[in-house]
Image (tube, rainbow, N blue to C red):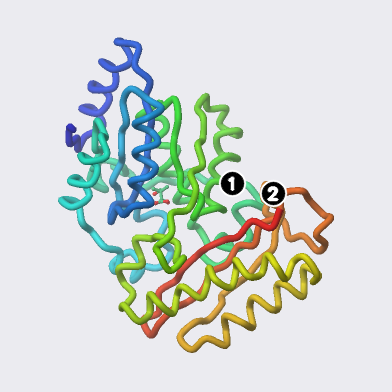
Amino acid sequence: MKRIYTIAELQAELREARNAGRTVGLVPTMGALHEGHASLVRRSVSENDCTVVSVFLNPTQFNDKTDLEKYPRTLEADCALLEACGATVVFAPSVEEIYPEPDTRVFSYPPTDSVMEGAFRPGHFNGVCQIVSKLFMMVEPDRAYFGEKDFQQIAVIRRMVEDLGLKLEIVPCPVIREESGLAMSSRNTLLSAEERQIASHIYRTLAESRQWAKEDTVSAVHDKVVSTLNEVPELEVQYYNIVDGKTLADVTSWDDSDDIVGCITVFCGSQPIRLIDHIRYK
Ligand code: PAF
């Protein structure tokens, strides 16, 4: 596995692969890798001749400076995991390499990028589109792999790919969960052992709500999920939206769409740590 830090070196390496007719898979990450990322890398390795994993903590997608400062940085451990998964290249550029000048491009794909995370983290998806579009242009992958944990992110990236007319396949990969059901996330390392247990209520409640959805209305299920989680000390729901899985527009009836997903963000613990998850109803 090669470690590459510059765009020029990355492109020279990929030129060789392309000339030899090899396919390229890209797994964009911000580091602090865990089993969820490993599953994306293994999938890319099994579907492409060459897998590039970017490890770049992208400042433009953090609207909260403290959140960026708190984000775990673990490049050595990340590289060990990537090597074990069979990645071909780790691309770990500096901020100056990626943004020699401030990126002033504006991406706007409402409602996918304006609701939920888009509403609570203004500018977040613009930053995601800035870095992901740059990576797509630098790597020109045949396929790019994203975890479905960030359900809304995939919907926004799909819109961007359509908008820019890019020829690549976006491959969504299932959420990998801890034994307790908690969705794996780099942020979980910021939780204490006790908070991790508490956080497992999130998925348990979402999973149970699929039963409630058999009898209750959308609005009753929404309210029951929110009140059940808010009753747990140390948890506070920021939003719970039950939406169409493609447009991310709210649904009001189970008959509104044949693709319905509940997307949640919950604060956990005293720091507090922001956790996201989702559940598919249909
Ligand atoms: O999902 C993430 O880790 C990031 O948003 C991504 C896609 C790597 C862009 O920085």
Above-or-below relation of 200 to 4 = below
Viewer-proximal residue, 184 or 135?
184
Q: Which mark is residue 155?
A: 1
Viewer-proximal residue, 174 or 153?
174
- Quadrant of the rendered structure where residue 271 is? bottom left
What is the x, y in percent for residue 192?
31, 78
Give the residue at x 73% y 60%: 250
Viewer-proximal residue, 78 or 65?
78
Q: Is residue 230 left or right of residue 83?
A: right
Q: Decide if ligand 1 comes within 8 Å of the CB at mark 1.
A: no
Q: Secondary structure at mark 1?
A: helix
- Quadrant of the rendered structure where residue 142 is? top left
- Quadrant of the rendered structure where residue 34 is? bottom left
Residue type marked 2: Thr
The N terminus - image quarter: top left
What is the x, y in percent for residue 10?
25, 28
Give the residue at x 42% y 55%: 61
**Badge 1 vs badge 2, beta-carbon distance below 8 Å:** yes
What is the x, y in percent for residue 174?
49, 48
List the residue tagged with mark 2.
247
